[in-house]
Amino acid sequence: MNDFTDSSRERALAEVLRTHPAVADAAVIESTDGRRLSARIVPDPGAAPMLHRSAALEAAGRLGDLSWHEPASGVRVAGFNRSETDFLHREIFAENAYFRHGITLPPGAVVVDVGANIGMFTLCAALHSPGARVIAVEPVAELAEAVALNAELHGVDATLLCGALGRAEGETEFTFYPNNSVMSGRFADASEDLAVLKGYLLTGQNAEKGAQLDRLVADRMRAEHRRVRVTTLACLADELELRHIDLLKIDVEKAEAEVLEGVGEALWPRIEQIVMEVHDTDGRLDTVLKELRSRGFEVAHEQDPRLLLTPCHNVYARRPEAAAGRALEAASASPFDGGPTQRELEQELRELIARSLPSAVPPDRFAVVADLAVVGGQPAAPGAVPDLADGSRTAILARIWAGLFGAEAVRPDADFFDLGGDSLTAVRLLAEVEAELGEGALAPDLIFTDSTFGALAAAMETDPLPGRAVS
């Protein structure tokens, strides 16, 4: 039996939420249909500075088309899609892909991040080197905005160049893949890039070829063509008065040779370390290795096992004298120190409610806001677990979802990626949905953009299937 009237229940829940040290203020609101409760949380600037700053940035309209992602404990960044953010975090932080083979940074290092994407390596470099100065270079304006936002969120000294580096100044054609931005580049080739992405996915456990994989890859590789300005690293160094560069990181999708050609003879001796991705086509890897050795670098290279079916290799170059006195291997970067993520805070608040008000039903949804007058703009998800036997599209999705993640995961707020889903799981989800409802029942892109069960179910119920009316 519930011990609360509706209004007293909401007040009591809000009072409990305010007792958490990371909560400066809170409100609990009932939905118009009376079926759901939502909580709005104002983070405490001292106990939850990361959430406090992110709420302020969002309230100021800085988030735009980006969304907040939390790929690991203590980590919150702005990005375009969850799967890419998870990939970048795993590669850069969890696997420490760039700080290997003796690559390390002193405090206050100067780092040039060429091909910064959303700024994940910019953040990583700053964590490895307290007081670092990072110059982030990113040609895609939307991604450059993410770099600026993430640097501000985490207090990183980052100078941003929205443009590309090459062998000479000017402009160039650029291909942007909005759904797979890490493969965007000047020398994008649709057939080559499709093959690279498919090769990467096929190295995953339980990967299967098929029409669903082909459609998922095609959706990920939808292209937009733009013109971007180009400068050289030599010109950039002169403009910013860079007397030396402790680490030059290059990840520019087949344009790496052009970046090196723009270094200039005067700048080469002032670069101490280089980490770069090289696409080994037409002997490019061997050419790059010879160039770096001729410039006095000790060089190593390796290939990620998941990229064995692709031409992508990582190259690590350092000057022997630069490494003198440093540890042979860089220590892992310290974790972000900004208090709890929203996911962590929500879990703590649910536990707090369970202890303090065991008879109360906790809110279905928690939103972090700068002010209680701000209402989150996310669409409301279906409020009840569907009847798995009623034959609706939501029920069909629920049965498939339960088969992938377990029956307890069939709830509106359950997130595909939080449950462990990835691109290969998306292929399986798509295949099973289409086996029951036909091709087009679930747009592949939705899995990566609206990844909760409730949002996917709502989209499937709203969008009529080919040849069918909405029930």
Image: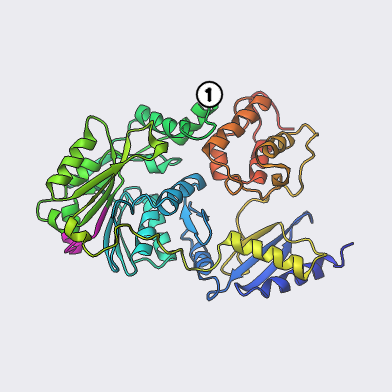
Pinpoint residue 98: horizontal percent, then vertical percent.
34, 51
Q: Nearer the viewer, residue 464 or 350?
A: 350
Residue 249, compared with residue 58, is above or below; it is above
Q: Left or right? Give the position of 50 relative to 248.
A: right
Check the image and tell me how it is coloured.
Answer: rainbow
**Residue found farthest to the right:** 1
Looking at the picture, how far across and down is residue 391, in whole percent? 77, 31
Residue, disc 1: 210
The answer to whether 159 is drawn above or below residue 162 in the figure is: below
Q: Is residue 207 above or below residue 48?
A: above
Query: Dot 1, crowdedness within 10 Å: few (<14), some or many (≥20)?
Result: few
| Res 48 → quadrant | bottom right
Question: Over which residues does the magenta segment extend?
Answer: 238-248
What amino acid is found at the position of numbered circle 1 in the picture? Gly
Question: Where in the figure is residue 1, as x and y percent of width and height?
Answer: 90, 62
Residue 39 rendering spot, x and y as whole percentages: 68, 63
Residue nearest the observer in this picture, 199 or 218: 199
Seen at 31% across and 46% down, the residue is 251
What's the residue at 51%, 53% (across, down)? 71
Q: Is residue 451 above or below residue 465?
A: below
